[in-house]
Image: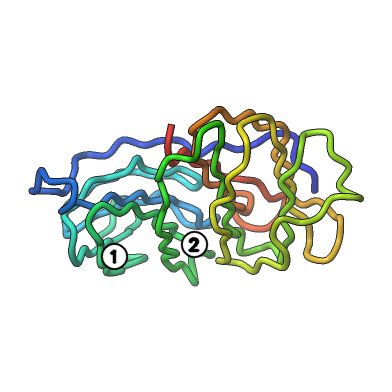
Amino acid sequence: MRLMSLTLALAIGALGACSDSTDPADQARIRVVHASPDAPNVDVLIDGAQVVTNAAFTESSNYLTVDAGSRVLRVEAVGSNTAAITTTLNAVGATDYTVIAANRLASIEPLVLTDDNTAPTAGNIKLRVVHGAPGAPNVDVYITAPTADLATATANFSNVAFRGFSPYVSVPAGAYRVRVTTAGTRTVVIDSGTLTLTTGQIRTAIARDITGGGAPFGLILLSDLN
């Protein structure tokens, strides 16, 4: 189904960083995204300290600074002490990570991505696409000019399965349109509409289910840089 607007991720407040070091080389950054369509609001803890509170589906945290090393990330329903997700991340210094709470609640799991927030070359932007919609089949992804005819376009990424993700694509700053189709067809299941991206910006677009699960599908758009 064609979507007429883009769903933006809402930044939620971090309750505090988890780093004792002041040297960036000894620090990493972790961002958490709630992309489980039928899961309740959640709290997030890193090494036992609550860093995000009451995050709803499609919401994301800011980057949270942590000490490099083995970090235990725990996601639990608000008001409970029962973990929906517990994962250990070996955080490398001077590295950024996105941890997505993915899949439906019965099968909820972490999807850990390493982010490349090095600035694009002059005049460019960078864009990454993630298949985070458990109710959607394998997909093709088209990144085009807003008015481009999809019938004559070539997919940037083909046959992407759930939990699959692209590398960052570097393209000139300007107006773009991201369309996601059922793999091997021109049947659009997600349409971002026009996205105007300015020099130096880095974005991650996550395909998602509707609240509760299934179609119509949409996007969570994250601002990685600028």
| Badge 2 amino acid | Ala
Q: Of 214 and 136, which appears nearest the observer?
A: 136
For mark 2, what is the residue? 102
Percent coordinates x, y for residue 30 in the rendering: 31, 51
Q: Which mark is residue 82?
A: 1
Q: Of 134 and 201, which appears nearest the observer?
A: 201
Q: Of 217 and 190, which appears nearest the observer?
A: 190
Is 140 placed left or right of 169 in the picture?
right
Percent coordinates x, y for residue 68 in the rendering: 18, 58
Q: How many marks?
A: 2
Report whether residue 132 is seen.
no
Percent coordinates x, y for residue 83 in the rendering: 30, 65
Instruction: Give the color scheme: rainbow, by chain, secondary structure or one colour.
Output: rainbow
- Which image quarter holds the C terminus? top left
The residue sitting at 78% across, 61% down in the picture is 182
**Residue sitting at the far front:** 122
